Image (tube, rainbow, N blue to C red):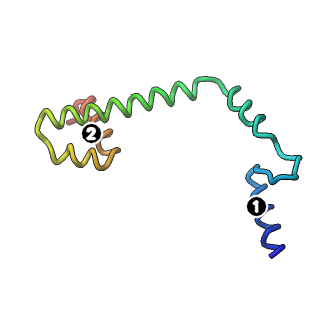
Amino acid sequence: MGHFFRSAVEGFELFGCSIAGHSDQHDVSDRIAGLQSRGTLGYLLFAVFSLAVLAGYITHVVVTAWEGSYWLLVLGMLFFPLGVGNGWLIWLGWI
């Protein structure tokens, strides 16, 4: 049992996590401070992508309801990426 626990602790520390009593690992506050110094470009790109996904899904719901394609509306509601992709293809004029 001791060997199993020791190997589990070593595997856990391999990913940069620490067990109580091991002070040689980084503190959580150091990791949070490191995230703040990465800049806002990543957050901005994430926000733009999230808005594009939301707008594509809303486009899918509105256009399929307006055109009466209820089977596609239901499929897009059950399978979210299908609805987003359909909305983006509507924007491009491919559908």
User: 55 above or below 7?
Assistant: above
Q: Which residue is mark 2?
A: 86
Figure quadrant of the N terminus = bottom right
Picture coordinates of residue 66 (x, y %)?
A: 13, 32
Alpha carbons under labels 1 and 2: distance apart: 44 Å
Front residue of 27/59: it is 27
Q: Is residue 21 left or right of residue 93?
A: right
Q: Is residue 68 left or right of residue 57?
A: left
- Assign a secondary structure to mark 1: helix
- Report the disc number at residue 61: none
Seen from this angle, which residue lies furthest bottom?
A: 1
Q: Which residue is mark 1?
A: 11
- Name which residue lies at 13% across and 42% down: 69
User: 72 above or below 44?
Assistant: below
Front residue of 34/85: it is 34
Figure quadrant of the C terminus = top left
Picture coordinates of residue 27 (x, y %)?
A: 80, 40
- Assign a secondary structure to mark 2: helix
